[in-house]
Structure formats: C-alpha cells, structure tokens
C-alpha cells in the first residue's frame, strides 16, 4: 500500500497541483475568484453567481447562452494551461521527447479544471432547479449547451496545437530518434548513474494521451539546449494562439453595436481573466527576469502620458463640447462662490417660482397636495422597484400622482426607472395611446445592461482600437459607457434619446415634474446638479437669519451655469443618467471640461436616496408651499429597508481583520440615513403638520434572497421585487397615501 501511495504522490498530476501552490501562486487567484463566485461567496450582493449560473443572451437564458459561457471557460482553462506550460516546462523536460507534449501537460494538469467543472455543474443544476424553478428537461438543455461550448473551445485549441506539434516533430524527429538509439547502445556498455540532483518536482508516473500510466523517460542524454529549443517552439506556438485570439477580439469590437456580438457578462469576465493570464505568460516568455523592471517602465510611461493628456482612460459626457480648451471654465473657489452669489440664486429661484405657479394653476380650485418623489440607487433592482411603485401609485390615484408631483430626483438605478416613467407620462400627455401600468414598461427597464457593457469592456476598452462616433460636430470614443447608453436607449425604445434641454419648456409649463440628475465629483465630493435650467439656489444650504464666519463653501455645482459655454443643455439624457449611475469600475468615470479637469462618479456616493436635493429644494420654497398647498408629501422609493436590521453581522476572523478598513464602506448608506433623518426632522418642524414623508421599501420575502445590486436581474429576482409591493409596510403606505390625496 505504501508503494502505491508513494507512486500516487509522485505522479505528475499531483506534483503539478502542488507546484501551482509553490510557484506563481498569483494565477490561483483567478481560480479562487471563479470558485468563490460560483459558490456565492464573492460579490454575492452584486449577483455575480447568477451571471454564471443563469447567463442571459439576447434577452433569454437558453442553451446558446450557456454554450457561450462554456466556450469562455474552455478558453480560460486553455489560457491557464498555456501559461503554466510556459512557466513550468523546465521542471518536466521529459515531456519534450514525447509526442504531443502540450496535450499530455493539459491532461496531467487537470485536477483544478476538473474540480471546477464538477463544482460548476452541481451549483448550476441546484440554482436552475431551486432558484429559477426549471424542470429537468430545461436543465438538461442548459447543461448540454455549456458542454458543447466547452468542448468546442478545447477542440479548437487542440487542433491548433496538434498542427503545431506535427510541424515541430517533423523537424526534430530525426534528432530525437538518433539520440534515443545512441542512448540505448550506451546504456548496454555503461549505465548512467542514479540522478541525485535536487529537483523542483519528482515524477515517477504521468498520464499518457490515452490516460494510461507511463514512466517518464530519462532525458539526461539530450543536450539541455535541444530540449529548450523544443519547448520554445511550443511556447512560440502558444503565443501565436494568444495573438490570434487578440485579433479575434479586436474584430468583434467592430461589430459590438449588433446585439448578436454582446455575449453574456460571465463570458466577458472569464475571457478577461484568460487575457490577463495569457499576457502574463507571453510577457514572462519574452522578458524572463526583466519582467518586473519592464513593467515598472511601462507603468511610468503610461502614467506620464496620462498626466500630459496624451491618453485618457476617462469617458466624456455625450453632447457636451470638449474641443475648445481655452474656453473651459475654471474649477476654483472663486468661480464656485461667484456662481452661488445671492443675485444668481435669486434669479434662478424666481424662474422656479414661476414653474410652481404654473403647476398650481393646473391643479384646479383650492389648495392642492404637492408631491416630491425621491428614488434610491441600486442598479436594475432599484429601477425595476421604482417602476413598479410608480405604476401602482398611478393606478391607486387614478392617474393623479404625476400631475401633482413637482419634483423627481434621486440616484443611480432608481433614476433610470423614474426618467423612463416620466417620459411615458409626457408621451401620454401629448396624446400617445399609452397605458402607464403596462407590464412591458417594467420589463423594458429591467432588461439586461451588463452584457453589452462587459462585452465592450473586453473587445473595445482593453484590446480594441478607438472607434469614434459623432453627435453633431462633436466626436466621442465608443467604449463601455457608450455601450451602456446605447443599450439603455434600445431597452426604452429610443424614448430617452433626448437632451436635458428638450425638457425645458415642458417643465417650465408644469406639464411634467422637474427632474434633477446628479453626480459626485471624485476630487472633493461636491454634487453636480443637472437640470433643464440653472438652479444655483441649490448650490449651498439655505442661509438662516444668523451669520456664520467663515461662511462655508458651496457643496454643489450647477451644471447648466458652469458649462453654459460648452452646450450644457445639449447633454444627452442617457449621459446624465449614466453619470448618475457611474458605479466604480463597472462604468468609466466621466470627465468634465474644466480647468483643472474634474471627473464625476455615482450620485449615490453623496446622496443615495435623493433626499438631500429634495429637502433643500423644499427648504427654499417652504413659504410658498405653506401658503399655497394643503399638504406637502415627500415620497421616498428605496431599494433597501431603513436600518437594514435584517442583515446579520459577520463574526468571522476575516471580518474582524477587515472591519477597520471597511467600516465606512459597509455603513455608508446608514450614515446617509442618519444625517438625512436629522434634516428631515428640522424641515418637518418648520413646515408643521402639513408635511408628510412616506417611504416605500424593497424588502425581500422571508424565503427570497435579495435581488443583486447590478444592471442584471433574473426572473426570480424580478418576481421577488414585484411581490415586495404587497408586504405589510408598503400596503400600509399605499393606504396612507390614498388618504392624503383626499
């Protein structure tokens, strides 16, 4: 038994498995991410596991979508095999004298890939059966699709390497045969002594191409240079394969506007991992011990070009003018203070007072009830929940909620749903035959946005050439920001293909509620407020009767005023929404043409619930509201419960070690809740008994998991979000609102 255990331990599969943990452990990080993602332990809140277990392609989960993911995982495994083959071949020189050494390496290097595939199939079947409620037949076709894609990737790779292997051995066969013949004759006269040199790995057995056990051949009679030549030719063939894959991805980038080429997000992520591993392998092959110094030089060079505006990884806001550097506004304290001067603030306030007077004139006799609607960030789950709530409100109030709403504001995903619903309402106002409660509008806003985004990231942002498009005489680069906006416009049937200036007349006339889009300046945390006209009275908190010295700087920037010379009113609504929802790394930061340049990110970093802007707006016009309105009702639509007591604390050692670093991140939205509750209480005290705040909350059901925080929802998540409208808290809030409408 001991003999068999020793033989098993010193077999090539086991030795390669252990070697990965001793050398180049960085490549195991990719495997950890894949295993943890499938298990639901990595980025669970963002729904990463569902991207792999229920991949969506062209709007549905089917065998085609799983086959694409299977192909990408096959490509990843082959990329990993190629790279580790390049790095570890010096420890397994005996493979150089066998036929098809790369195939044998892949077979013996299969422990981790096979373990992953078994784990993946188990979790996929479990997810599809219990979460997606699919039958055995549907699950079989999904599994068959994955398997076919995976096998196709392996076939393509091995057919290529078989051809390369045949070419190499055609040139080397005579040398190998002669060396073996001389070796056999020499052994008869003078056997070679036992090799006592210390080796990285000891191999007693390896698996052949037919999965039979073979004893490795002694290769000491070959010149090391000769073995290196064989391996280097295989390595070169591997690098050529990587180069061909790059050309293929670049070609795909030219056709990404066609949805057929927008592969499932899981496939894009996996291909991204494959690219990183492949580049690392190629880099190591050509640079050897100079890899680290060359990487430092490359980094310093790219950083220098970035600092001198030769390259720029940031994205532009479409519709805004960037070409005239001389006319860019200064981003300085003097400029911001000047914009927020009492004279400018008062002029803008008068324009908005006219809007309020026009709104009141449309309400009929008597004092109306004024509504302000705030929506929270939260990706597609917030967009879908917002649309569900607004449709239910429209139904319960017989279409009166939107005419009585003066302001809509918020962050990220919630604004996608709010902007789409407002546009549908505006179309109906102009006579379009639209039923606002139609289910298809909910499905529109919940359609996938991740696939085009990640496909563009891989095929355009990383490896593809810069492809441009025009808006008028302005030129912009197609990247994942463009892909996101294009998908959003397509999902909403082109209804959001407008500029923010297109809404000026409708908002001035109070046909539709005023809407403020916002974003957060990454440099100093100030809020950028984007609307159809300047609103400089919102740039700082309302001044009270007492004086504060020194006076605080404005904490918000009025977009229309600062960029009046850069065609601010021609900003695309889709760009405003994207700036509102620029989740870090998922979407590119948007840079704005100021001097110095600033860039903006997700509005949720500053105000995830939209309350800050609404409270400041109401504080400015509280005297008018008290004199002209019977009640003022602030409606908050949020994708998470207040307090979030439902989430248990993590008591693991990892949590204990990381808590000091992640304290602010984990409590960011709670901190916003705390200080906004204070603001709300101050305003409520000032406004008196005519002020109300109603909150609709998405709370997952007792047996449901929370919908993921991403731009992708699966069928079970959409069902859970829709059901959340009927929980006890939301039903009570709907009833209270109906009473307040009377």
Image (tube, rainbow, N blue to C red):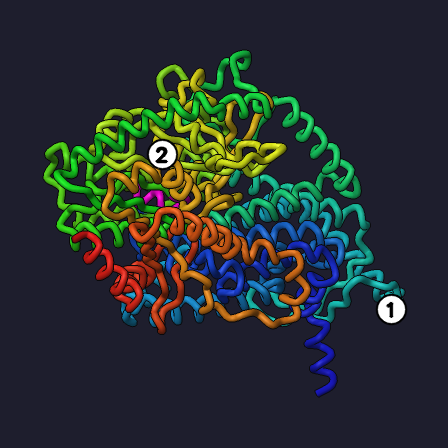
Q: Write the residue at 62% across / 67% down.
A: 207
- As drawn, the label of residue 194 is 1
Query: How many numbered markers are drawn?
Result: 2
Q: Which residue, as the protein is rendered here, is positioned at the far bottom?
A: 1
Q: Write the residue at 66% across / 70% down.
A: 653
Q: Nearer the viewer, residue 30 or 496?
A: 496
Q: Identify the element where label 2 is drawn.
A: helix
Label 1 environment density (alpha carbons within 10 Å; few <14, some 14–19, many ≥20): few
- As drawn, the label of residue 574 is 2
Give percent across and percent down for residue 334.
Answer: 58, 22
Give percent across and percent down for residue 397.
Answer: 16, 52
Give percent across and percent down for residue 529.
Answer: 43, 33
Q: Is residue 568 magenta?
A: no
For the stretch drawn in magenta, the main secondary structure is helix
Say which of marks 1 and 2 sits in front.
2
Q: Is residue 246 above or below residue 50?
A: above
Q: Write the residue at 50% across / 38% down.
A: 520
Q: Nearer the viewer, residue 109 or 102?
A: 109
Label 2 environment density (alpha carbons within 10 Å; few <14, some 14–19, many ≥20): many
What span is colored magenta in the figure? 410-419
Q: Nearer the viewer, residue 86 or 551?
A: 551
Q: Is residue 540 left or right of residue 533?
A: right
Q: Write the residue at 32% across / 55% down.
A: 694
Q: Is residue 469 above or below residue 210?
A: above
Is residue 105 visible to the viewer in this orientation of the structure?
yes
């Amino acid at each position: 038994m001991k003999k068999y255990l020793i033989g098993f331990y010193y077999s090539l599969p086991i030795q390669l498995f252990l070697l990965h943990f001793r050398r180049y452990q960085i490549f195991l990080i990719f495997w950890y991410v894949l295993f943890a993602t499938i298990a639901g332990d990595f980025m669970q809140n963002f729904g990463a596991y569902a991207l792999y277990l229920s991949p969506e392609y062209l709007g549905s989960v089917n065998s085609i979508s799983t086959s694409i993911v299977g192909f990408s995982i096959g490509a990843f495994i082959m990329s990993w095999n190629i790279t580790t083959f390049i790095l570890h071949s010096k420890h397994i020189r005996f493979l150089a004298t066998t036929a098809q050494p790369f195939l044998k390496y892949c077979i013996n290097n299969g422990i981790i890939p096979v373990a992953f595939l078994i784990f993946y199939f188990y979790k996929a079947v479990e997810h599809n059966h219990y979460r997606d409620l699919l039958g055995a037949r549907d699950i079989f076709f999904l599994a068959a699709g994955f398997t076919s894609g995976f096998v196709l990737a392996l076939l393509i790779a091995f057919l290529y390497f078989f051809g390369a292997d045949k070419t190499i051995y055609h040139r080397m066969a005579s040398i190998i045969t002669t060396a073996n013949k001389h070796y056999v004759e020499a052994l008869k006269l003078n056997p070679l002594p036992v090799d006592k040199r210390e080796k990285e790995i000891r191999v007693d057995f390896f698996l052949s191409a037919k999965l039979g056990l073979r004893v490795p051949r002694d290769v000491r009679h070959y010149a090391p240079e000769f073995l290196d030549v064989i391996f280097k030719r295989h390595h070169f063939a591997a690098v050529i394969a990587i180069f061909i894959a790059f050309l293929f991805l670049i070609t795909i980038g030219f056709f990404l506007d066609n949805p057929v080429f927008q592969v499932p997000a899981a496939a894009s992520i996996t291909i991204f991992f494959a690219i990183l591993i492949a580049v690392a392998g190629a880099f190591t092959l050509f640079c050897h011990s100079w890899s680290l110094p060359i990487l430092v030089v490359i980094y310093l060079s790219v950083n220098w070009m970035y600092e001198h505006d030769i390259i720029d990884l940031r994205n532009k806001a479409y519709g805004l003018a960037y070409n005239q550097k001389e006319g860019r506004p200064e981003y300085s304290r003097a400029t911001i203070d000047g914009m927020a001067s009492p004279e400018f603030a008062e002029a803008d306030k008068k324009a908005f007072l006219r809007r309020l007077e026009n709104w009141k004139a449309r309400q009929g006799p008597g004092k109306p009830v004024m509504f302000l609607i705030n929506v929270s960030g939260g990706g597609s789950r917030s967009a879908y929940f917002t649309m569900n709530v607004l449709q239910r409100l429209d139904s319960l109030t017989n279409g009166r909620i939107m005419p009585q709403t003066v302001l809509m504001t918020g962050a990220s995903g919630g604004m996608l749903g709010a902007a789409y619903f407002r546009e549908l309402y505006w179309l109906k106002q102009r006579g379009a035959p639209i039923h606002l409660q139609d289910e298809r509008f909910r499905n529109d806003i919940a359609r996938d946005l991740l696939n085009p985004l990640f496909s563009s990231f891989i095929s355009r942002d990383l490896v593809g050439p810069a492809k441009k498009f025009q808006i008028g005489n302005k030129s912009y680069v197609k990247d994942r920001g463009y892909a996101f906006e294009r998908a959003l416009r397509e999902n909403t049937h082109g209804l959001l293909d407008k500029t923010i200036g297109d809404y000026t007349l409708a908002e001035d006339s109070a046909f539709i509620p005023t809407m403020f889009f916002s974003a957060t300046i990454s440099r100093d945390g100030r809020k950028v407020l984007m609307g159809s006209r300047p609103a400089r009275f919102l740039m700082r908190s309302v001044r009270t009767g007492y004086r504060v010295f020194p006076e605080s700087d404005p904490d918000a920037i009025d977009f229309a005023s600062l960029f009046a010379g850069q065609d601010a009113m021609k900003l695309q609504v889709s760009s405003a929404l994207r700036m509102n929802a620029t989740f870090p790394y998922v979407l590119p930061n948007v840079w704005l043409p100021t001097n110095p340049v600033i860039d903006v990110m997700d509005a949720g970093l500053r105000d995830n619930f939209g309350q800050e802007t609404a409270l400041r707006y109401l504080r400015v016009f509280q005297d008018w509201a008290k004199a002209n309105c019977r009640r003022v009702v602030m409606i908050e639509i949020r994708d998470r419960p207040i307090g979030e007591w439902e989430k248990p604390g993590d008591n693991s050692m990892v949590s204990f070690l990381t808590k000091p670093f992640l304290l602010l991140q984990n409590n960011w939205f709670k901190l916003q809740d705390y200080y906004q509750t204070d603001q709300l209480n101050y305003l409520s005290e000032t406004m008196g008994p005519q002020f109300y705040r109603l909150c609709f909350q998405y709370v997952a059901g007792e047996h449901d998991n929370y919908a993921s925080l991403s731009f992708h929802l699966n069928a079970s998540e959409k069902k859970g979000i829709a059901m959340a409208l009927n929980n006890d808290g939301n039903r009570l809030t709907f009833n209270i609102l109906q009473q307040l409408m009377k």
